[in-house]
């Protein structure tokens, strides 16, 4: 929607003014939304009081969340004011403001605005004072900035001559503008700048997700990780070929051996300066299947379409590491591991009935080659426990269709038996608006994965507790003493409709949650 969005402490003279109002009191029929006192003064200073008063008095505008109305004031109506509805004051949340940020972005893009002054902090402060909600000016600004930045995502690099137009000199012609945003409240403005930064990282994740599998091969994903690491100052290494054999990365080797695009394990590291640089790291692990045909257990009918997004756990971790290095910059080390492979078909393909042995000694009977993600994640979990001395491990994966049946596109499935880590993930979920729902991990579920041939099987034909089976399998590769959280994002990594801060396509789910977790 925009060529770029940046925060500027000084507003443009031609900037659009954006203000907010809360919904009118439904208990008092006939009442209309009103500006709070501080916002009213800002509108008055812009010479737009009468125009805005007239606009919010229109019968169709009641201040519902995400609704909006425009007013024009000044000489020739050159001063544009967008009044956006914030919903019920007592229900104000950062999630509301993130949604509203997306609405603002859509309106500014439609108006081809090059500058905007966003004055929502006073309205938010008024609601917080009345309701007692714990929303600071910075948090409010960050949520608005995220919504604005997320709706600004554009990925048209795969469009061709039918869509893209060029001028006589061969230069691409675009109708998108470069947007500068500002605010008179410094703390709110700092939050907007932070939110825009987080959105950049999430949008990096979304573009990787959108990239088709003939381009986003295993080596491409490794190269993207390397380029990003070099740009933002992360340490990078990759394990591939003979190194995978030496380290007995049997999941990656078996799942990836049918493809000409060879598997690898990428490691990224953020190291802070100061006394905490040698502290135990938080380890983030991402399932990065660049394409999943199902292997010999071939997906049927149209089930393969969209499998370019089976890498979205890894994309989210890459986005999180970008945010950690550029926005969060925590005083603690963070390590990322990406299990990268393509699940394809050839005479080299691994088979149902194969038994493979992992570096921790666990043997696995393969019963379904389409349950491949857990096999490659197991390698990274083993490595993290043995080699990284982690303070905690969090993995993200588009792991099961069962979690979509259970939770739809509203929540990611969370599996975490450590109370302290679970509380931190839930707090980060609330801050980011990327919602999680805890699912159980009792011993009975791990018993479901036992095999009559090997220690465990990778998929039980019994469909009971299907989303839990994947997590139960992974538990066999995690040291019980290490706090661990598994997030199954299969239902949330793609937008379910075009609304708020998102358009149809990838959401970048997990990038902002992990960034908020590390920030806290």
Image (cartoon, helix red, strand yellow):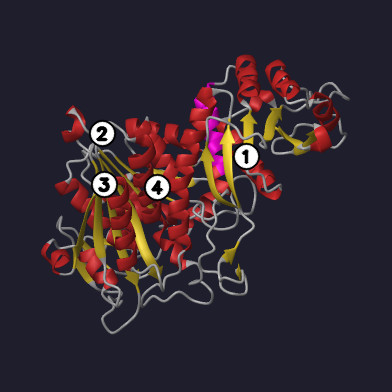
Residue under label 1: 115
Looking at the image, is mark 4 or mark 3 earlier in the sequence?
3
- Asked which quadrant contains residue 263, the reply is bottom left
Mark 3 lies on a secondary structure that is loop
Looking at the image, which is closer to me, 462 or 199?
Answer: 199
Distance Cα–Cα, label 2 vs label 4: 22 Å
Instruction: Give yes or no for contact between labels 1 and 3 (Cβ–Cβ under 8 Å).
Output: no
Q: Position of residue 207 (x, y in %)?
A: 46, 58
Q: Position of residue 18 (x, y in %)?
A: 68, 33
- Would you call the spot at circle 3 few (<14 residues within 10 Å), some (14-19), or many (20 or more)? many
The answer to whether any part of residue 447 appears in the image is no
Which is in the foreground here, disc 1 or disc 3? 1
Distance Cα–Cα, label 1 vs label 4: 39 Å
Q: Is residue 360 left or right of residue 317?
A: left
Which is in the foreground here, disc 1 or disc 4? 1
Which is in the foreground here, disc 2 or disc 3? 3
For the record, the magenta segment spans 134-148
Answer above or below: position of 454 versus 145: below
Which is in the foreground here, disc 4 or disc 3? 3
Distance Cα–Cα, label 4 vs label 3: 24 Å
Residue in the image at 57% along x and 21% along y: 133
Residue under label 2: 332
Q: Position of residue 4 (x, y in %)?
A: 53, 48
Which is in the foreground here, disc 1 or disc 2? 1
Q: Which disc, if any, is residue 487? A: 4
Residue under label 3: 234
Looking at the image, is mark 1 or mark 3 earlier in the sequence?
1
Distance Cα–Cα, label 2 vs label 3: 13 Å
Answer above or below: position of 343 versus 383: below
């Amino acid at each position: 929607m925009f060529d770029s969005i940046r925060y500027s402490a000084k507003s443009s003279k031609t900037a659009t003014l954006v203000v907010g109002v809360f919904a009118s009191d439904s208990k008092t029929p006939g009442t209309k939304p009103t500006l709070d006192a501080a916002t009213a003064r800002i509108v008055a200073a812009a010479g737009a009081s009468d125009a805005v008063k007239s606009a919010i008095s229109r019968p169709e505008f009641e201040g519902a969340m995400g609704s909006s109305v425009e007013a024009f004031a000044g000489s020739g109506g050159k001063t544009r004011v967008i009044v956006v509805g914030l919903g019920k004051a007592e229900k104000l949340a950062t999630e509301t403001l993130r949604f509203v940020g997306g609405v603002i972005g859509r309106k500014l893009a439609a108006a081809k605005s090059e500058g905007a002054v966003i004055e929502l902090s006073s309205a938010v402060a008024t609601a917080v004072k009345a309701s007692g909600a714990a929303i600071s000016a910075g948090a409010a600004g960050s949520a608005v900035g995220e919504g604005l930045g997320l709706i600004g995502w554009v990925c048209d690099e795969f469009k061709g001559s039918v869509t893209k137009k060029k001028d006589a000199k061969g230069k691409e012609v675009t109708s998108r503008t470069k947007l500068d945003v500002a605010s008179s409240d410094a703390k709110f403005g700092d939050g907007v700048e932070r939110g825009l930064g987080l959105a950049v990282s999430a949008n990096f994740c979304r573009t990787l997700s959108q990239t088709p599998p003939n381009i986003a091969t295993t080596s491409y994903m490794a190269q993207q990780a390397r380029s990003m690491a070099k740009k933002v100052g992360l340490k990078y290494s990759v394990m591939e070929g003979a190194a995978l054999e030496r380290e007995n990365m049997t999941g990656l080797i078996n799942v990836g051996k049918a493809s000409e695009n060879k598997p690898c394990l990428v490691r990224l590291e953020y190291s802070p300066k100061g006394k905490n640089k040698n502290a135990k790291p938080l380890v983030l692990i991402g399932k990065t299947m660049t394409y999943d045909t199902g292997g010999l257990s071939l997906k049927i009918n149209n089930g393969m379409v969209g499998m370019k997004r089976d890498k979205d756990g890894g994309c989210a971790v890459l986005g999180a590491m970008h945010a950690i290095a550029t926005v969060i910059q925590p005083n603690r080390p963070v390590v990322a591991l990406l299990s990268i492979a393509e699940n394809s078909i050839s005479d080299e393909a691994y088979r149902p009935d194969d038994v493979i042995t992992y570096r921790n000694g666990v043997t696995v009977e393969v019963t379904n080659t389409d349950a491949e993600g857990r096999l490659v994640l197991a390698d990274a979990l083993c490595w993290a426990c043995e080699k990284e001395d982690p303070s905690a491990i969090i993995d993200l994966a588009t792991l099961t269709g069962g979690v979509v049946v259970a939770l739809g596109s509203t929540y990611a499935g969370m599996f975490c038996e450590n109370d302290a880590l679970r509380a931190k993930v839930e707090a980060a979920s609330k801050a980011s608006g990327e919602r999680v729902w805890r699912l159980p991990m009792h011993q009975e579920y791990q018993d479901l994965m036992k095999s009559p041939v090997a220690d465990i099987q990778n998929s039980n034909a019994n469909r009971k507790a299907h989303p839990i089976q994947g997590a139960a399998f992974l538990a066999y590769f995690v040291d019980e003493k290490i706090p661990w959280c598994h997030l199954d994002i299969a239902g949330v990594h793609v937008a379910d409709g075009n609304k708020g801060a998102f358009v149809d396509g990838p959401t970048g789910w997990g990038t902002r949650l992990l960034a908020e977790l590390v920030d806290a």
